[in-house]
Image: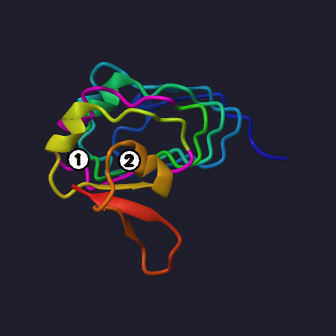
Amino acid sequence: MGAKLRTFDLALTPNLKRLRLTECSHLVELQAPEDLGLSECLEELTLAGCEVLQDIPNNICKMKRLERFHLGYCVAIEKLPEELGRLECLKELNIEGTSIRHLPQSIFELKGLRIVGIRWLLESFGFTSEIQTSEDKKFCYVEL
């Protein structure tokens, strides 16, 4: 029987480098305090398979060192924060299996960002010739 984590407060983990909350089927809210940007350590945030999680708090955009942000199969997530482009260190964004239908304009300012997703989803964002397939053929991605 799995844990039934419903909320997670990022303020409780100021020195954490990697946070992986995978398949938390009861996680409905990710709490991010106003001073989240003061968390200088978090480099990876994985919320894969959190099926009922609907919103990503805007304060995520203050995480100065975030390099990898994985939302794979968070099927209820429909949008990303508009200021996601403020994540200057972001190198990988996985949106495979989400319900996201729009990428924030600010994201296109991030050079070297790899966006991982299903081919038809990447095509719906206007990427066509830029889409690449991983060597093992397991996922598609675009590099900005």
Q: In the drawing, does residue 44 fall left or right of residue 87?
A: right
Q: Residue furthest top?
A: 34
Query: Would you place residue 52 above or below residue 131 in this image?
Result: above
Disc 2/disc 1 C-alpha distance (Å): 11 Å
Q: Amino acid at mark 1?
A: Arg
**Residue pictured at 47% horizontal, 57% vertical:** 119
Residue 125 quadrant? top left
Query: Would you place residue 111 above or below residue 130 in this image?
Result: above
Prevailing secondary structure of the magenta residues: loop
- CB contact under 8 Å: marks 2 and 1: no
In which quadrant is the C terminus drawn? Answer: bottom left
Q: Amino acid at mark 2?
A: Leu
Q: What is the crowding at mark 1: few (fewer than 14 residues within 10 Å), some, or many (at least 20)? A: some
Secondary structure beneath dot 1 equals loop
Mark linked to residue 16: 2
Q: Is residue 86 magenta?
A: yes
Q: Nearer the viewer, residue 26 or 14?
A: 26
Q: Is residue 83 magenta?
A: yes
Q: Which residues are magenta?
A: 78-97
**Residue pictured at 19% horizontal, 50% vertical:** 89
Q: What is the crowding at mark 2: few (fewer than 14 residues within 10 Å), some, or many (at least 20)? A: some
Mark linked to residue 65: 1
Query: Would you place residue 140 above or below residue 106 in this image?
Result: below
**Residue 35 locus on image (x, y percent):** 27, 23
Q: Nearer the viewer, residue 118 or 88?
A: 118
The earlier-in-sequence mark between 2 and 1 is: 2
